[in-house]
Image (tube, rainbow, N blue to C red):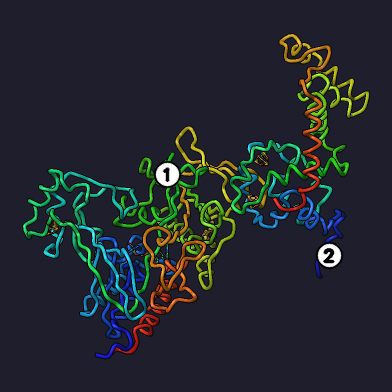
Amino acid sequence: MANQGPKSQTILVVGGGIAGVTAAIEAAETGYDVILLERGPALGGRVAQLNRYFPKLCHPTCGLEINFQRIRKLKNLRVVTMASVAGVKGEKGDYTVSVSVSPRYVNANCTACGACAEATDMEVDSPFNYGLSKTKAAYLPHEHAFPMRYVVAPSAIGTPEADKIKAACKYDAVDLEDKGEDFEVNCGAVIWATGWEPYDPEKLESYNYNLSADIVSNVQMERLANHDGPTGGKIVRPSNGEPVKKVAMIQCAGSRDLNHLPYCSRICCLGSLKHAVYVREQYEDAQVDIYYIDLRAHDKLEAFYQRVAADPQVNFVKSKPASIRIDEEGRPVLCGENTITRELYEAPYDLVVLATGMKPAASEGYVPDIAMEQDEYGFLVPSVEGDGGIIPAGVASGPLDVSMSVQSATAAALKAIQAVGPKS
Amino acid sequence: MTVALPEQATRKYDLGFARWVRDNVNGGAKMSMCMQCGMCSGSCPIGTEMDQGPRKLFMMIRAGMKDEVFNSSTIWNCTSCYNCTVRCPRGVPVTYIIQDLAAKAVEFGYVKKVENARFAKAFWWSAKTFGRTDERLMTAKYYFSFGLVEGMKRGLANLKIAIGMVRTKRMHIGMPHKIKDTKGLQAILAKAAEIDARESKGGA
Ligand SMILES: Cc1cc2nc3c(=O)[nH]c(=O)nc-3n(C[C@H](O)[C@H](O)[C@H](O)COP(=O)(O)OP(=O)(O)OC[C@H]3O[C@@H](n4cnc5c(N)ncnc54)[C@H](O)[C@@H]3O)c2cc1C
Ligand code: SF4
Ligand code: SF4
Ligand code: SF4
Ligand code: SF4
């Protein structure tokens, strides 16, 4: 074969969130070979942890399930979980990517029968519930996990619990000797869709996140409201399980702040409006106060704001709260200045939700330094001199909501196809 | 019938004031970054003792309310704790701006109307002259800044406290206590004033 054109037409997608999943499917459905790498044990990324989507308030599991059906039909799409990238070399049409797979300790024989989880008493913090609950040391990532396969927590390995877990499995699916593996992939284009991390609320010192269980972050609020979350979907005070009557949302908690994330995370105003709906659906008498600098419901999502604002029990307070203190009864008290009335307030709440922003996952860990670069905030942009063979998508490329992430993923799939050329 | 037009505003707005602050007040150039979030006023430990608080003061500057700004208690009650400056999400050096507005208020003769400004002046006089605060002379200077009669009145009203302070050695009678090297102090202050005159234009 003449050494012309791309050496490989395989498209590699890094990150199995909604953006990566979409890009991989779109590219594979046009006939190209696609490999999708996901660092975690299951696909779906952050949206799998959301309760419902604004503005329609539909369930993310529905859209994810449709995507998983599409994946099942595609023989030319290979999904590798527990996998991340250690290095990328080469150029458009001929990249060599070093992939490193961490041990899951459960192989493809797993039927998700759950006997291993029953066999052990050992518990670890549930990553899926952002630490709001515990899970068994042998666990299914979540109800709708794809692949539907258990994981053994690394902390169990080498303990007698691991032996109990192994002994309980009738299908020879538990492999305590699993060491993971490293391998190389040759591909013609790479789509980088590593998404985001919630901004760490502990860094917002004056909000004293650590002093009260009743101060939660917005991603935790999604779990509190979800039927498979720590409270079975009932929004209660995490400290004592009591119903919430007064709830505060603090906007721009760590975003639009030179001391934290300087940019607007774009989705957290809508997220809090959605959280107000969660609360109001569950409690007829509850009051929700949203503390804001400006409310940003971009584009047509203004209609969602109008809808929520029509509820007389949802109030908007124009103020960036200065601090949260804990009163004698252990309730969080918001302190600050109402900038419309110039009143200084001290307002106690049953539950405070910090609308923390999205930090690009790419700001930590390996990112290829060819064809792509990080902007001043850590989001990825194609580099000007680059050959366009590595393409950022989803929140890795900027603070986007799901529909914008999906659009950027589809665009990335098209660019990847252009990069590897017409199917030979 | 159409509703009558509102009466014309009687307040004076100086539309060039914001620009003047930007160009002449220490840190003033960064004031344009302020997004009126309220973090500064909400963080201020003596916020309840301020008529406006920093956020509103900045809005008043933008609105051109020159006299109200310079007569505001906010610029005199600031304790320079820097809470606001540290927490401001837009990097506005709130404390510097407030401090320099106070200095400018003195320069342009606004202080007569503000009690705290008189006190600050008396405090500064004592610090500058003796290198430390002399409670008795400083208080006297402050009281008599209101005029002879008012000064006597205030002095008499606080006589009991004064005697108590003398008794517990919190205040003394006789020559004022001084630091050893008042000349050195004057030289330092003169140098500081010189640097300030050279560098304190706009920017932080
Ligand atoms: C509180 C909250 C509520 C929200 N609610 C809504 C909503 O109602 N509607 C809406 O439209 N949007 C909402 N969003 C935004 C939405 O979550 C994002 O748009 C969406 O998650 C973006 O998907 P993504 O695939 O780009 O990133 P992610 O969901 O972060 O997925 C990235 C994936 O990549 C994997 N990964 C990361 N690094 C690597 C690596 N090095 N190697 C391999 N894999 C890696 C991760 O494990 C993850 O699975 C909300 C956001 C927040 C914070
Ligand atoms: S690892 Fe074995 S026991 Fe555990 S769920 Fe899978 S098949 Fe069942
Ligand atoms: S979307 Fe709203 S809460 Fe989020 S950073 Fe922007 S303005 Fe702040
Ligand atoms: S904290 Fe900063 S941005 Fe906010 S009102 Fe004060 S000066 Fe303006
Ligand atoms: S520096 Fe002054 S204005 Fe700022 S918080 Fe402290 S006392 Fe208040």
Residue A5: percent from left, percent from top: 33, 87
Q: Residues within 10 Å of mark 2 (few under 14, many from 20)?
A: few
Find the residue positioned furthest to the right.
B148
Return the residue nearer the eye: B56 or A309: B56
Residue at image point 81% right, 17% down: B176
Nearer to us in this view, A385 or A372: A385
Q: Give the letter of the chain under mark 2.
A: B
Question: What residue sits right under mark 2 in the picture?
Answer: B5
Taking depth in this image into account, of A154 and B185 the one nearest to the observer is: B185
Q: Chain of mark 1?
A: A
Is residue B107 found left or right of A310 in the rendered image? right
Q: Secondary structure at mark 2?
A: loop
Residue hosting label 1: A214
Q: Is residue A25 visible?
A: no
| Amino acid bearing label 1 | Asp
- Position of residue A292 measured from the top left corner of the image (x, y, whole percent): 56, 55
Q: Across the whole image, how many numbered discs are drawn on residues? A: 2
Q: Is residue A344 above or below residue B23?
A: above
Res. B49 in view: yes
**Three-letter code for the amino acid on which mark 2 is drawn:** Leu
User: Is disc 1 in contact with disc 2, using a CB cutoff of under 8 Å?
Assistant: no
Ligand 2 sits in quadrant: bottom left
Left or right for A141, reference B184: left
How far across and how far down the image is residue B12, in percent?
A: 86, 54
